[in-house]
Image (tube, grey):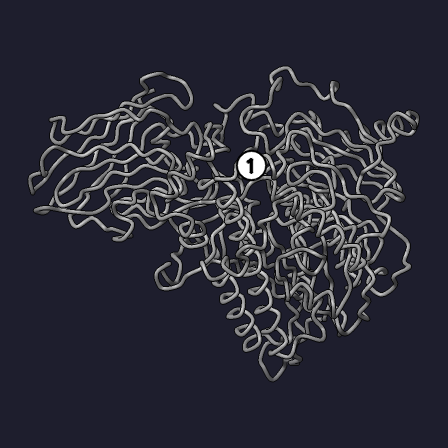
Amino acid sequence: MNPQDVLPFPPTPSASVAGRTMQESVYRQRVTPSRLPADAPNILIILIDDAGPGLPDTFGGEVATDTLSRVIGEGIGFNRFHTTAMCSPTRASLLTGRNHHRIGNGQIAELANDWDGYAGEIPKSSALAPEVLKDYGYATSAFGKWHNTPTIETGATGPFHNWPTSIGFEYFYGFLAGEASQYEPNLVRNTTSVLPPKTPAEGYHLSEDLADDAIGWLRNHKALAPEKPFFMYWATGSMHGPHHIMKEWADRYSGRFDGGWDEYREIVFQRAKEKGWIPGDAQLTERDPRMPAWEDIPADEREFQTRLMEVAAGFAEHADVQAGRVIDEIEDLGYGDNTLVLYIWGDNGSSGEGQNGTISELLAQNGIPSTVPMHIQAMNEMGGLDVLGTAKVDNMYHAGWAWAGSTPYKGMKLLASHLGGTRNPMAVRWPARIVPDSAPRPQFVHCTDIVPTIYDLLGITPPRVVNGVPQDPIDGSSFAEALTDAEAAETHLTQYFEIMGSRAIYHDGWMASAFGPRAPWVPGVPEGIAEWTPDQDTWELYHLAEDWTQADDLADSHPEKLAQMKELFAIEAAKNSVYPVGGALWVPIYHPELRLSTPYRSWNFTGDLRRMPEVIAPQLGSRANTVTIDAVLPENGSGVLYALGGAGGGLTCYLDDGYLCYEHNLFLIRRTKLRSRQRLTAGRAEIVIETGYVDPRPGGPLRIVLSVDGEEVATGVVPISAPGLFTANDCLDIGVCLGGSVSLDYVDRAPFPFTGTIDTVTVTYAS
């Protein structure tokens, strides 16, 4: 093997010759050779979450994206850049250069299962780019959303071998889960759980914090290691739900979406053509018949639906502004000219997971039916339209806006079959090498191409062994030539796509597509999913070289070509561990009882437990259990005994002026509250909260019994329980509520620490 084939590089040997004494020795200072070109650029990757091409005004949308416009105006844009249609898969592919199933990321980390393509763990045989770049001499850092660590490994004690700082990044600040409250996130710095530096009342917002921390890291880097180039991965939580943004940002868009999503698509489509972002002969695709037209939305619900979109737009603009602050700092430090910026607008298309429009976006993911009037009523009880975007709710817009945000294409996030789920804009700026060009680059590019392009630019041969582990081949191909030559040959000729049974195959200008078993915007379990097999799916065929948007299905007129493409998909699927097709549905649809959780059935906590991620915490709302609290109560004590979840959904037990209280917050639309009839007596007490199913089925009603020193003090029934998680990123806290306030009764007193002493908390499952 060549020396560069094995990483890390061996230590540079001493250049001195040691004798018996220093007088008999020869001293020469060893010099570690530089393994990078003298002009190796700094690299900044900006990744926005759940954002489609029809949103930025850069490309004809309504959302102000001055930073994105600036990057593309001072560089180039790729209008045929592609993602996988889902969060974790895109991120894993982008950072490794390998196809997502081949590295165990056929779905998000939370839904991992035992099939190789869906295992939820990036294998050590596919080292991340920062691991390689670090060994070559780069300083590496990551900020924001991660979503590539196995879910059950995200607690304060790890294990840490799959955390960012163990697989290439020397510094990490952000959140490990797929989403987070923008006001009260569960944050990690390197391998330590940390609290946000400010409260929402003090003006905290996660996107701003990520920019602040990145700027601090850049300044430290400039002071301490200015000779080293840096690789920074800056990934926002925006625009993933919940859509959290301060009112003044949402108000900028007041009235601008009143025409609805059908009109919006028409306007953006024409603007995109005028800007030259899409070809003049591109066709605007039709709305899926399962997607409601704007005119179908009742008049008394439209104000709610447009405000949800105004909030989302403000959320997106705010994230773009924070990205601009990072770029400004790079320029102020003198790095601007030789920094390669890759600004990727979306790890997939816009997300329809808000379905019919919601004030609590995980409601739909738990499969709990609700109506828009229910959401509006709960919203009005909390303060009306102005509550949207605040820490009190986990709002997300109607899927119609996601469809509009993916203009001009069919589909959205989770649909790997159509370009609305997989085609995202990418802007690239590198003043030292790239001449600005307003015409989009025409080459087909995929997220697996980022890593080989970086290696190509730096003259790095992908290593054959990293940390003793033989490496898998890289699947992507370099588009380095296209950075400086608009006419460069297309290098990525074949690419499969598959997410939850929705799938496609691209080859040399053609695409064959199978929609799959579920439309992400349709609530509930898809009809017929129990018997679904991919063999039943209808395939479509598009000649993308002549049909930019997948508007003309040629399946009937070109059956031989379709058969060829389907065979090519089968080959690529077999090569990349895609089988079984739809394997990502195994847990959420077919076997929810296999949802990842810890193996424990009982826990013994001290009274100071903080920030235990819900996914690895006791399932207090979806398993029959008993919680026993040994505490010393003060006179008329107050404060949280424990809280699981956040403002958008959860459960909590607390004291309020001496009364024992319990609340089950079913995603804001239904709250069940219990309260003791009398104040509890001061002194040592054993408080017991028993949870049992009235009807033992997922989502079934729960009977809650509160007892103190063996005496029942309150009892009641939770009519509907949450079969899954209340949150994706919030936690179990004891003695305080450090995340979103589960109960509105103490939201103004948050984090509402308990005024007594909690010695122990024991949790035991009934079975």
- Is residue 3 something that shows in the picture? no
Question: Residue 421: x, y in percent?
Answer: 69, 41
Q: Residue at x 48, y 44 (%)?
A: 304
Q: Residue at x 93, y 26 (%)?
A: 560
Q: Residue 279's x, y, as percent?
A: 84, 52
Is 143 located above or below residue 41 in the figure?
A: above
Instruction: Give the camera-side residue of 394 and 38.
Output: 394
Q: Is residue 312 left or right of residue 721?
A: right
Tell me: residue 532, above or below residue 381. Answer: above
Dividing the picture into quadrants, the one containing residue 7 is bottom right
Residue 643 horizontal side relative to residue 344, left or right:
left
Which quadrant of the figure has residue 587? top right
Residue 654 x %, y % = 22, 41
Q: Amino acid at mark 1?
A: Ile
Q: Quadrant of the C terminus?
A: top left
Quarter holding residue 69: bottom right
Q: Which residue is mark 1?
A: 297
Q: Residue at x 28, y 25 (%)?
A: 691
Provide the secondary structure element on which disc 1 rests.
Answer: loop
**Mark 1, residues whose alpha carbon is within 10 Å: few (<14), some, or many (≥20)?**
few
> In this rendering, is residue 520 above or below 326?
above
Residue 614 vertical position relative to residue 599 in the rendered view, above or below: below
Residue 361 place in picture, x, y as percent: 48, 40
Using the image as rendered, state which of residue 459 and residue 670 is in the foreground.
670
Residue furthest to the bottom in view is: 23
